[in-house]
Image (cartoon, rainbow, N blue to C red):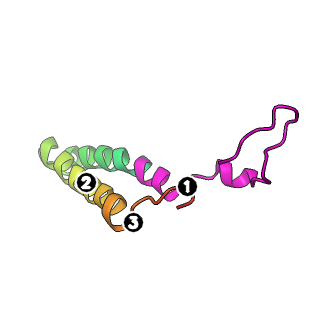
Amino acid sequence: MNVRDPSSNDLVSGADPARLLSPSKYDLLLAVVPALLVAGAVAGTRLALPPSVGTGLGSLLAALLVGYGLFVEPPMGGRGA
């Protein structure tokens, strides 16, 4: 964990500032979940399917992605895990 030194403007322990700003794979996974839901709903309306079918397919893909993130590649601690 990086902590700011109150007496200066620098990070203690030589932290890489670029790493603090770059999203982890779990941040990206959480960003993709609602995108899949919206894409499913939009696809359902554009392809003349009932909206529930499109949203259901999008939610199925989102659930598979969350399952992957939880059980196949589980977070093991720290930010870059």
* Local secondary structure at mark 2: helix
Q: Residue at x 39, y 66 (%)?
A: 73
The residue tagged with tag 1: helix, strand or loop?
loop
Q: Residue 61's quadrant in the figure?
A: bottom left
What number is the disc on residue 78?
1
- Is disc 1 in contact with disc 2, using a CB cutoff of under 8 Å? no
CA–CA distance in space, label 3 to label 2: 14 Å
- Check disc 1: other Cα within 10 Å, few if <14, some if 14-19, many if 20+: few
* Circle 2 Cα neighbour tier, 10 Å, few/some/many (<14 / 14–19 / ≥20): some
Q: Could you say whether the residue bearing mark 3 is in a helix, strand or loop?
A: loop
Labels 1 & 3 near each other (Cβ < 8 A): no
Residue 51 shown left or right of residue 36 in the figure:
left
Residue at horizontal 13%, vertical 43%?
52
Under mark 1, the amino acid is: Gly
Query: Depth check: 66 or 47 in front?
Result: 66
The percent position of residue 59, horizontal first and vertical second, equals 23, 49
Q: Is residue 74 above or below residue 11?
A: below
The span shown in magenta is 1-30
Look at mark 2 in the image and give the residue it sits on: 63
Q: Quick check: is 19 in the magenta stretch?
A: yes
Mark whose residue sits in front, 1 or 2:
1
Residue 47 at what x, y percent from top left? 20, 51
Residue 28 relative to residue 17: left or right: left
Identity, as a three-letter code, of the amino acid under mark 2: Ala
Residue at 33% across / 58% down in the picture?
A: 70
Q: Which residue is mark 3?
A: 73
